[in-house]
Amino acid sequence: MRVVRISCVGTRHLSPPSSSSAAHSDVSASSAGLSNADAEDASCGGTGTPSLRIKKRLTCVCFYRKRAYERICSNLTPLQEERLKRLTKRMNNCFDASRSDHQDALRALWSATYPGEKLEALISDQWKDMGWQGRDPSTDFRGGGFISLENLLFFAKTFPTSFQRLLKKQGGKRAAWEYPFAVAGVNITFMIMQMLDLEASKPRTFVRSVFLQMLSENEWAFDLLYCVAFAVMDKQWLDRNATYMEFNDVLRCTRAQVERELMMDDVFRIEDMPSFSLLS
């Protein structure tokens, strides 16, 4: 794959490939700080061989995709700056059990998860059925913050069939000691925040630049990516016949697969990712 160095004058939005383009092809950045997926490939079903070399010049990353030349710059458009600012504000919003809007979001999650079933109190043994560690779910939000609750609620409302299937552990051969659904969701939010590295002052991963292009097309790209990652995690869990003690390994392989799919030539939106088909 040829790499050129040119002077960039702006950000060019990616346009979908023609209908004659070939099927999805994995593209990974080098393991020297441009992507974290390659280091995991050998143990997560990948080849372990980076297929894209990237060179930086000033604030721009210029590269050839396999079938069409595209350019992505780290200089953000006004729309990208606005949406990134809004997203990072969400990411930095800690869950506060004393805030009425956060309490309302918890109640909304309960109603979306168990429609028709009354929640007795915000601190109740009922929450354990959803996969929280104790009677008070607010104690499990430390890693993911309020956005992890928003992600769960978005998943429940946008893809209710998939949400209920994962919640109830339907399909496939399940382990005697399954992962706790809600806590797994908080961990997935944290994993995606780490993977995208959105709070870094300068881009350190190529997948971040790709995601920002997607964010400019859809303000809910982060939430959609969360739903995809949750479905991928559950599939990885079943494929590996995993148990609770292997959850971190499954999460690591989930991240590697999500990164590989984001880097595919013909993935321009979250909806283009092959694993998006897992959702319903």
Image (spheres, rainbow, N blue to C red):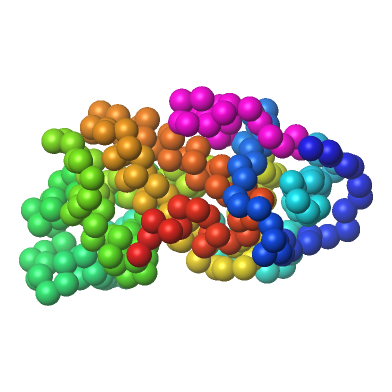
Residue at coordinates 71% horizontally, 64% vertically from top-left?
18
Residue 177 belongs to the span the image colors magenta: no
The answer to whether 26 appears left or right of 102 in the picture is: right
The answer to whether 34 appears left or right of 118 in the picture is: right
Measured as percent of width and height from the top left, residue 152 is found at 33, 59
Measured as percent of width and height from the top left, residue 227 is found at 40, 57
Above or below, comparing residue 191 to residue 228 in the picture: above
Measured as percent of width and height from the top left, residue 272 is found at 55, 59
Above or below, comparing residue 196 to residue 117 in the picture: above
Measured as percent of width and height from the top left, residue 94 is found at 39, 54
The answer to whether 220 appears left or right of 60 in the picture is: left
Outermost residue, bottom side = 116
Residue at coordinates 45% horizontally, 52% vertically from top-left?
275
Outermost residue, right side = 7
From which residue to which does the magenta span run? Answer: 36-54
Q: Quadrant of the N terminus?
A: top right
